[in-house]
Structure formats: C-alpha cells, structure tokens
Image (tube, helix red, strand yellow):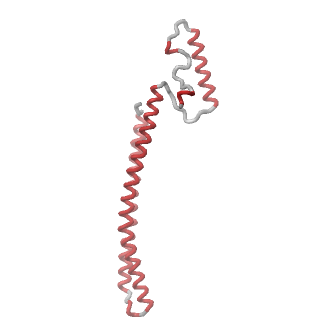
Amino acid sequence: MSETYEEQRSSQNDSTMAGLRHRLYGVKTTNVALVLFIVGIAFIALGAIVHEEKGLVYEIVHHVLRDLGLAGIISALLGSAYEYLLRRDFVNDAQTGLREVLKEDREKLDRFRAAGLETIHDELTIDLLEQNFLNVMRKAQRDSTSPQRSESSRPGRGLLSRESWT
C-alpha cells in the first residue's frame, strides 16, 4: 500500500503546519508569561512606592499591590512551565494513540486489499450500488458469451460477500 505523491505532499504540509502551530503556541505562551512577569514586577514596584505608614488605606494598597505582584510572577513561572509539560505529554500521548489506531486500520485495509477489495467509497448511495451492480452484470454476461472462460474471470470475483464483512 504505497502513498501517492499528492498524499505524501499533503502529509508533509500537515506536518509543517502542525510545527508552525506548535511554535506559534510556544511564542504565545512565552509572551503571556512575560507579560504576567512584568506586570507582577510592576505591581511589586508600585507597592514599594506606596508607604504603608501613611494610614490604613495606604497599608492595604501596599499589601494588595505586593500580593498581586507576587501572584503575577508565580503564575507566570508555574503556569508556563505547567503548560509546556502538559502540552508535551498530551501531544506525545495523542501521537502514540493515533499511531496505534492508524496501524490497526492500515492492517485491516491491507487484509481487505489482499482479499480483493479494490475501492473504498466515502458514501454508499443507491446510484453507486446500481452502477456497480450493472457493471458486474455486464461483465458476467460478457464473460459467459466469451469462448474461453478462466477461473479468474468468473462473475463476482473481487467482491466481498456479506459473510466476509464480519
């Protein structure tokens, strides 16, 4: 079961696009982490400017800004690290699972082709069934009228019976 040039090129384009999306995600995550880190530093700096000795409101503002700054820095560091690790693990798990599923499907397809399956249609319509039935009947009539009839040209060769589907 060999892939055509178009299928290979499409697969390469999909891989390239996935790589670009992954890089874009990395840049986006890095930018969010950087913004959170800078905002955290700015809040801590603003909290340091506000003197808590001037009154209760100043003391509350000082502590709130300091705590928001710490929360921004911590969320930037832990959030981005967690996202990168989680994303990498998820991608690895998804790739492994897809590889296994595709391997099983490819093995089934190879068995069907070895059994004589020629085409897989996306959708089975009544028109397609009628057309294929007429083609098989015409071929059977041609084969029955020909003087030499070999075993390989008998009607129905290459078709799957209902029993072979299960």
Residue 52 location, quadrant: bottom left
Viewer-nearest residue: 126 or 45: 126
Q: Relative to 144, does residue 58 appear above or below in the rendering? A: below
- Residue at the (54%, 6%) spot, across then down: 147
The residue at the point 43 percent across, 86 percent down is 60
Q: Quadrant of residue 142?
A: top right
Q: Where does the image place residue 36, in percent across and percent down from the top left?
A: 39, 70
Position of residue 16 measured from the top left corner of the image (x, y, whole percent): 38, 47
Please state if 148 lies on the left or on the right of 12 as rendered: right
Residue 105 x %, y % = 45, 37
Q: How many marks?
A: 0
24 to the left or right of 130: left
Quadrant where the image shows the N terminus:
top left
Q: Quadrant of residue 23?
A: bottom left
User: Is residue 117 placed above or below 143 in the rendered structure?
Assistant: below
Return the residue found at the far top: 147
The correct choice, above or below, for 9 with respect to 77 in the image is above
Looking at the image, residue 146 sits to the left or right of residue 1; the answer is: right
Residue in the picture at 54% in, 15% down: 154
Give residue 151's position: percent from left, percent from top. 50, 13
